[in-house]
Amino acid sequence: EIVLTQSPATLSLSPGERATLSCRASQSVGSYLAWYQQKPGQAPRLLIYDASNRATGIPARFSGSGSGTDFTLTISSLEPEDFAVYYCQQRSNWPPLFTFGPGTKVDFK
Amino acid sequence: QVHLVESGGGVVQPGGSLTLSCAASGFSFSRYAMHWVRQAPGKGLEWVAFIQYDGSNKCYADSVKGRFTISRDNSKNTLSLQMNSLRPEDTAVYYCAKDYGVIAFDYWGQGTLVTVSS
């Protein structure tokens, strides 16, 4: 089973600052890596799929990079609505089994 | 506009059963795989089950294999999750989610809470 590790657990920043979130896989997942944003009381929202492709309607300040075992989600300039928990997620080859990382909380400094 | 609405959650005793439903609209349901994902109170996300667009393939997380069954009725645009032998650790909000390329989940319902407690 592939395990995803996210760091840091909490990231304390101010609006306008750059956020860099890391996701590491215990073995290569190729580019099968997605990122989600979740706000309290809401369902998750897909931000990035295939490691670097923005989902429909996602602002350009969100970008993803990486392949293999190391991935990064970058928010270039934090907006107030970006303070939330972010999860990475991978899919194994076949059968398709999916796992999530433990999450990174981006909160106000 | 994609819309997913879960129902069927509630309180059930350990060892009991419950069936969740997800009503889908706004897209061609029969053309897409679907998933169930859960989130225990205050915890992270856990994928539960996958079903291919035509129901021909199903996959489960180890934590629910043999106890949960995912199914779909493409004539009614409905996804279901039959949950048997429920345990306290199955307590969570259960989300249905539309598949994106069998790599991600691009639309989610609002979730339904299942509480397993005596």
Image (cartoon, coloured by chain):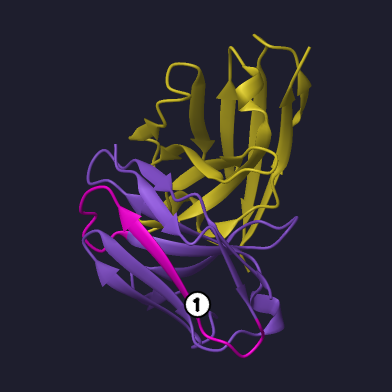
Residue at 58 percent across and 33 percent down: it is B80
Q: In terms of depth relative to the viewer, which is nearer, B7 or B39?
A: B39
The answer to which quarter of the image holds residue A84 is bottom right
Q: Is residue A78 magenta?
A: no
Among the chains pictured, the one given purple colouring is A
Tell me the quadrant of the picture where the C terminus of chain B can be found: top right
- SS for callout 1: loop
The answer to which quarter of the image holds residue A65 is bottom left
Among the chains pictured, the one given yellow colouring is B
Q: Position of residue B116 (x, y in %)?
A: 71, 21
Q: Is residue A21 magenta?
A: yes
How would you classify the magenta stretch by its main secondary structure? loop
Q: In terms of depth relative to the viewer, which is nearer, B85 or B35?
A: B85
Q: Position of residue B8 (x, y in %)?
A: 73, 32
Residue at 45 percent across and 79 percent down: it is A74
The answer to which quarter of the image holds residue B88 is top right
Q: Position of residue A88 (x, y in %)?
A: 44, 58
- Left or right of B72: which side holds B23? right
Task: Kindly tell me whether residue B99 is visible in this rendering.
Answer: yes
Q: In terms of depth relative to the viewer, which is nearer, B5 or B87?
A: B87
Q: In terms of depth relative to the viewer, which is nearer, B37 or A21?
A: A21
Which residue matches tag 1?
A56
Task: Kindly tell me whether residue B105 is visible in this rendering.
Answer: no
Residue at 21 percent across and 60 percent down: it is A30
The magenta region covers A14-32
Residue at 57 percent across and 46 percent down: it is B44
Q: Position of residue B2 (x, y in %)?
A: 61, 63
